[in-house]
Amino acid sequence: MRTVKAPGFGPKGILRYVLPFTVFLKLQDIGGDVLPPYDEEFVEVPMSSEQARAYDRLSRELTQALKEALAHKDTTLLGVVLNVLLAWPDCCFRPETVKHPRSRALINFSKSIFDDESTMPKEDELVAMCRSEKAEGRKVLVYSTYTGKRDTTSRLKRVLEQAGLKVAVLRSSIDTSRREDWIADQVEKGIDILITNPELVKTGLDLLDFPTIAFMQTGWNVYTLQQAARRSWRIGQHRAVRVVFFGYAETSQIACLRLMASKIAVAQSTSGDIPESGLDALNSDGESVEMELARQLVA
């Protein structure tokens, strides 16, 4: 048996039969009491003293290696250095080995700072928030962009469960067509927290059961961030939606959040919106954040 897709509804059909009778509205344009209040906030988390010292050493060594590489017209280290500096504060419960992507020469080795018996500052902030939200009868959707080689979701699940919370992790192994039913099953089982990568739920899912959303990291994709942040702020939501962004103080994570805030502001401005993101507090006037981030890496 051979299956062939039938012709779809083409652009000309949309132009002739749909657009003349269509009005496009954003959720905030609907008005009335259709949507509940929506609030975003940014939480800057100080690192522990040992964590901060290790990060400073890592940052100095990687930055020096990057400068030397750029002096020889080698740009292959740029992505490596930036990714490590962004990820290490959240992944320092395991050793970090940084090698040159071409020569495989060792650039840096950093031992683990935390073990299975200790929790990281950002994890402590998340636990405190989740406990508070549970006390108010609110479920929390936790986003982590590190679900592959640098997986943090298993550790987050364990930390939250040790705090007395019931947790489920949505992974990419769950087929797209089954994710909504899978999440509904977990809600029926009484979970307090759902952990996942924002890429897995950025479109097609209305997660009304989770009025509180926490970003442990944001990633670089503005579209994914904006879509993921509003997964529970949909028609049918009757509770105020709270979105929290966590970032480690005095690290590249803050520069990344500033960059995302700048991109969101531009995206909203070009669509006629006044930026109201919680990240907008990081979007200072002056030179572009991209240039600021580049200066921080090679200054």
Image (tube, rainbow, N blue to C red):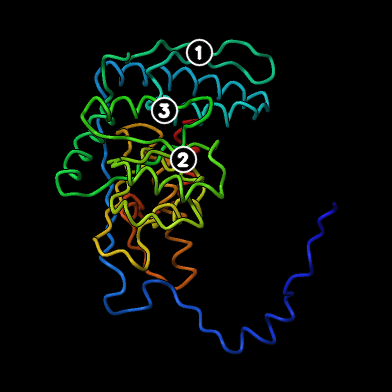
Q: Going 26% across and 42% down the picture, which residue do you hit?
A: 43
Of the pair 268 and 73, the residue shown nearer to us = 268
Give percent across and percent down for residue 213: 32, 48
Measure the C-alpha gap from mark 2 to mark 3. Answer: 10 Å
- The amino acid beneath tag 1 is Asn
**Classed neighbour count for the residue bearing mark 2: other residues with Cα under 10 Å, few (<14), some (14–19), many (≥20):** many
Above or below for 274 versus 162: below
Q: Going 59% across and 15% down the picture, which residue do you hit?
A: 99
Give percent across and percent down for residue 196: 43, 39
Looking at the image, the residue that sits furthest to the right is 2
Q: Nearer the viewer, mark 2 or mark 1?
A: 2
Above or below for 41 versus 47: below
Q: How many marks?
A: 3
Left or right of residue 175: residue 141: left
Residue linked to disc 1 = 108
Residue linked to disc 2 = 197
Provide the secondary structure element on which disc 2 rests: loop
**Classed neighbour count for the residue bearing mark 3: other residues with Cα under 10 Å, few (<14), some (14–19), many (≥20):** some
Residue linked to disc 3 = 152
Give percent across and percent down for residue 297: 48, 31
Q: Nearer the viewer, mark 3 or mark 1?
A: 3
- The amino acid beneath tag 2 is Asn
Provide the secondary structure element on which disc 3 rests: loop
Q: Going 32% across and 53% down the picture, which residue do you hit?
A: 209
Measure the C-alpha gap from mark 3 to mark 1. Answer: 21 Å
